[in-house]
Image (cartoon, coloured by chain):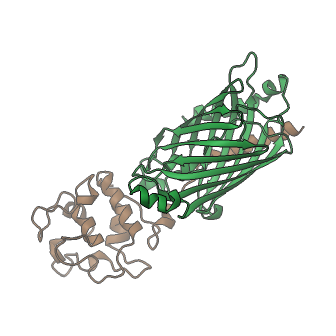
């Protein structure tokens, strides 16, 4: 598996001429079916214009929505009164088709990531492919490093919808030393879609079935979002709090509870 | 030119990714940094040695050298494995000291963790300090792997 991923990534690195050879659309122009750089927790293949940037804030409230009386849940304003795992993210268009970024969550995990658009969907090419590389560490990037490598394969249906398949391998997802565990890595396939149901309103959903180390509930999430200029406001429901590859790989609480959350993103270009 | 730089950066990052990350067992093991989930290591680091946290060696009491081993458990080097693995517990009928592959029901773990229902006191008898959670976890791993004579 490692060799296969390594081969795919090297191939991806060696292939950017394919992206350049096509007529590159202006990446600053809004893509109606793919308006944001993430679905809910998983990335999309949206290109960031060179020298452009984007910011995102994520909230995952930690009060479960199921299992209690509706009145109690409503009394806590569906979790908004509770604590939350908060994420702050900034990404920057380093080169054409390439972006780098940093994402920090309030459990003191810091993720550095890079993404490169390898193939662009076009008349003769049905799929858009991006390579994804990231490394995250807990305790403000001082402990437990989990690098990840993967691909984002997507297809956009006109201005209406986009679907995503994202095979990602994450190393060292298990917080214990490898001598004490059966699996130290996780391979997951992120699956997601975004559908434009109104001119500026979208439904979005994603999941991430896994193999290898998979202690918690498999990641699943869905939401509704509203685009307003360069902003995207998203209300979502998830079975966990993960917003980084290793967090998503580890899954949510084992009880399969559901939690309210939101994402707000802003483009600077 | 910039694209070429990006390629080099990404290739370098890919190499970094495949440099596997992991937590160090020596750090995890705390006061016994050389402890590993092997019988030889457990014998050396836990049964026969005290550690920097002040825990005493098990063989202070569980030895036949100049005394009768406490609880009928002799952890001297040459007999410890046979005294533990698939061996019945004298003071608790039906219990087995180490059940290969089943750390939860192994009486050794129950005694080290001070589980409810054990006969007598939690071990080490003069604790605290007892074994740390991580030290017990390493012993648990050896049992989970089938308690090999390694």
Which residue is more in the foreground, A146 or B135?
Answer: A146
Q: Which part of the image, by quadrant, shows the N terminus of chain A?
A: top right
Q: Which residue lies furthest to the top in this view?
A: A124
Q: Which of A225 and A173 is in front in this view?
A: A225
What percent of the width, then of the height, locates residue B132? Answer: 39, 72
Up the image or down, A235 lies above or below B61; here it is: above
Q: Can residue B20 be seen in this view?
A: yes
**In the image, B110: left or right of A139?**
left
Q: Nearer the viewer, residue A222 or A253?
A: A222
Residue at point 76%, 16% (across, down) = A123
Nearest the viewer among B47 and A2 is A2
Q: How many labels does the image show?
A: 0
Chain represented in green: A
Q: Answer whether residue A188 is visible to the viewer in this image.
A: no
Q: In this view, does A118 lie above or below A242?
A: above
Residue at 37% in and 78% down: B50
Quadrant including the C terminus of chain A: top right
For chain B, what colour was chosen?
brown
A53 vs A164, left or right, is right
The image position of residue A24, as x and y in percent, is 84, 27
Asked if residue A31 lies left or right of residue A205, the reply is: right
Spot occupied by residue B111 in the image (x, y as percentages of width and height): 25, 70
Q: Which residue is drawn at 50% across and 62% down?
A: A76
Q: Position of residue B146 (x, y in %)?
A: 29, 51
Compared across the picture, whether B106 is left or right of A49 comes to left
Occupied quadrant, residue B107? bottom left
Image vertical order of residue A31 relative to residue B71, above or below = above
């Amino acid at each position: 598996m490692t060799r296969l991923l390594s081969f795919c990534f090297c191939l991806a690195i060696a292939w950017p001429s394919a992206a350049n050879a096509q007529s590159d659309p202006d990446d600053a122009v809004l893509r109606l079916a793919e308006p944001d750089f993430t679905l809910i927790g998983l990335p999309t293949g949206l290109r960031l214009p060179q020298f452009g940037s984007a910011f995102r804030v994520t909230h995952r409230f930690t009060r479960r929505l199921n299992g209690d009386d509706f009145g109690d849940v409503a009394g806590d304003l569906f979790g908004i009164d509770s604590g939350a795992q908060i994420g702050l993210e900034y990404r920057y268009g380093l080169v054409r088709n390439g972006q780098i970024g940093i994402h920090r969550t309030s459990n003191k995990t810091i993720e550095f990531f890079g993404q490169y658009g390898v193939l662009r969907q076009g008349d003769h090419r049905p799929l858009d492919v991006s390579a994804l590389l990231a490394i995250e560490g807990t305790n403000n990037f001082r402990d437990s490093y989990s690098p990840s490598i993967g691909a984002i394969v997507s297809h956009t249906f006109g201005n209406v919808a986009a679907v995503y398949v994202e095979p990602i391998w994450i190393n060292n997802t298990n917080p214990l030393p490898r001598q004490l565990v059966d699996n130290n890595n996780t391979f997951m396939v992120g699956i997601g879609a975004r559908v434009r149901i109104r001119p500026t309103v979208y439904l979005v959903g994603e999941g991430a079935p896994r193999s290898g180390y998979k202690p918690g509930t498999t990641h699943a999430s869905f939401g509704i979002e509203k685009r307003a200029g360069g902003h995207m406001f998203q209300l979502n429901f998830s079975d966990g709090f993960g917003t980084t590859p290793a967090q998503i790989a580890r899954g949510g609480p084992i009880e399969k509870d559901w939690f309210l959350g939101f994402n707000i993103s802003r483009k600077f270009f | 030119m910039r694209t070429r730089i990006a390629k080099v950066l990404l290739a370098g990052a890919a190499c970094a990714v495949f440099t596997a990350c992991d937590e160090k067992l020596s750090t995890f093991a705390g006061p016994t940094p050389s402890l590993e989930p092997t019988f030889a290591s457990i014998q050396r680091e836990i049964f026969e040695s005290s550690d920097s946290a002040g825990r005493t060696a098990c063989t202070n009491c569980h030895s036949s050298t100049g005394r009768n081993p406490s609880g009928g458990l002799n952890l001297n080097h040459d007999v410890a494995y046979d005294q533990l693995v698939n061996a019945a517990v004298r003071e608790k009928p039906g219990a087995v000291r180490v059940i290969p592959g089943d750390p939860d029901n192994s009486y050794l773990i129950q005694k080290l963790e001070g589980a409810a229902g054990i006969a007598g006191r939690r071990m080490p008898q003069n604790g605290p300090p007892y074994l740390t959670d991580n030290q017990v976890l390493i012993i648990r791993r050896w049992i989970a792997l089938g308690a090999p004579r390694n």
